Image: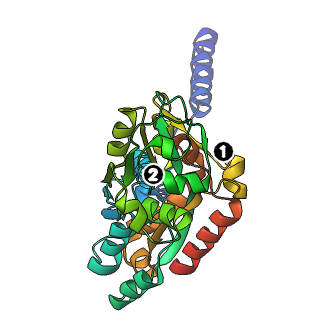
């Protein structure tokens, strides 16, 4: 065979072998990675609300009673609503006696507000309609005897002088000769008021005959009416809850009683003779049947001491508030 032809054929064979080898070593086609499927996330459970949270309840709450307790209950109702309660809260200022009557006779309210303790006869009335009232102490008031800032002759009175001023005396000079020979103008709470009852009990010994027979006396269940009457004359005098004095301190002057001024110390230790507790009343059945009432009362007891001073009253002691919370827990079975 021609040597040139042999070399050409050999070259072709070698080239074919090399091409075959290259084809065998070519990388295989790249596979797409398998898709990873994750399990669906578990739904997040909604947070459980405290059953006494304002956000957890709705419905109507109806309270009535003391004009003294009224501004405190009004403040607590505003805060309860501000923190999420969407229902309606009614607070009627009609006097302690009238409020307890609505609660114990008509039975059309959920809570009675009172500036005095409930009486045995009132408890009996409650029980006759199937209500067994529970007492909750929410604060302390210094029942305040006040005159106008224009009065420049009275700063302190004794209990005996109070009895004359709101009773048999006609002119100021009948009480002290150095006082003006001017008629005493009296502005006092109505007979349905716990403030009236408390004052009579401590000054006259429960018999209201003397105070009701006094001349120049205007009675009203609305303490703001009394405030306006006293503001109008330097010879006027009256009494009501401390909050109404505090709200009008720029035009009214509070009197010391037997040399003692009302303040947080004298009210707490009882040396101010007209210091008195403030109460709410409801029943275990109402608390258990109406979650909104239970939530409001629990909220009231939990936060009242954060509001009461600004309203114009004095805090109940920690032991008194704890006793109220214990009574609440017992009523709802906690």
Residue topped by disc 1 = 263
Residue 274 percent location from the top left of the image: 59, 56
Residue 333 visible somewhere in the drawing: no
Q: Quadrant of residue 210?
A: bottom left
**For the residue carrying disc 1, how many other residues have a C-alpha within 10 Å: few (<14), some (14-19), or many (20+)?**
some
Residue 27 horizontal/vertical position (percent) = 58, 32
Q: Please, what secondary structure does the residue beneath circle 2 have?
A: loop
Marker disc for residue 87: none
Viewer-side residue, 88 vs 211: 211
Instruction: Name the residue rendered at 68%, 47% in the picture.
Output: 264
Q: Position of residue 332 (x, y in %)?
A: 51, 78
Query: Is label 1 in a helix, a strand or a loop?
Result: loop
> In the image, what residue occupies the spot 40% across and 70% down?
291
C-alpha distance separating marks 2 and 1: 29 Å
Give the residue drawn at x 69%, y 58%: 270
In the visual, does 60 lie left or right of 293? left
Q: Quadrant of the N terminus?
A: top right
Residue nearest the observer in this picture, 284 or 4: 284
Q: Nearer the viewer, mark 2 or mark 1?
A: 2
- Please indicate, yes or no, whether residue 63 appears anywhere in the rendered image: yes
Position of the C terminus by quadrant: bottom right
Q: Position of residue 187 (x, y in %)?
A: 37, 47
The residue nearer to you, when weighing 228 against 51, is 228
Location of mark 2 (residue): 169
């Amino acid at each position: 065979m021609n040597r040139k032809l042999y070399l050409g054929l050999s070259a072709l064979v070698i080239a074919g072998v090399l091409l075959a080898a290259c084809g065998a070593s070519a990388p295989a086609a790249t596979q797409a990675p398998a898709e990873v499927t994750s399990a669906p996330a578990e739904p997040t459970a909604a947070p459980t609300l405290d059953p006494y949270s304002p956000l957890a309840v709705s419905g109507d709450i109806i309270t009535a009673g003391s004009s003294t307790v009224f501004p405190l209950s009004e403040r607590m109702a505003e805060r309860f609503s501000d923190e999420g309660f969407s229902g309606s809260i009614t607070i009627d200022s009609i006097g302690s006696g009238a409020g307890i009557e609505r609660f114990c006779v008509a039975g059309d309210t959920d809570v009675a507000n009172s500036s005095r303790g409930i009486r045995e006869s009132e408890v009996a009335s409650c029980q006759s309609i199937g209500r067994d009232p529970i007492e909750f102490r929410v604060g302390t008031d210094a029942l305040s005897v006040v005159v106008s800032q224009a009065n420049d002759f009275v700063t302190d009175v004794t209990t005996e002088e109070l009895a004359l001023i709101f009773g048999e005396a006609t002119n100021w000079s009948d009480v002290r000769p150095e006082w003006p020979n001017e008629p005493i103008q009296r502005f006092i709470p109505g007979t349905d008021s716990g403030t009236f009852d408390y004052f009579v009990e401590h000054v006259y010994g429960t018999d209201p005959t003397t105070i009701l027979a006094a001349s120049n006396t205007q009675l009203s269940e609305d303490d703001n009416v009394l405030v306006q009457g006293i503001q109008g004359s330097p010879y006027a005098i009256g009494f009501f809850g401390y909050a109404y004095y505090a709200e009008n301190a720029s035009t009214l002057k509070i009197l010391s009683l037997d040399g003692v001024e009302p303040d947080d110390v004298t009210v707490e230790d009882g040396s101010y003779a007209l210091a008195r507790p403030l109460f709410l009343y409801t029943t275990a059945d109402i608390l258990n049947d109406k979650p909104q009432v239970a939530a409001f009362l629990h909220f009231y007891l939990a936060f009242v001491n954060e509001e009461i001073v600004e309203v114009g009253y004095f805090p109940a002691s920690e032991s008194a508030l704890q006793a109220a919370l214990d009574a609440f827990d017992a009523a709802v079975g906690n």
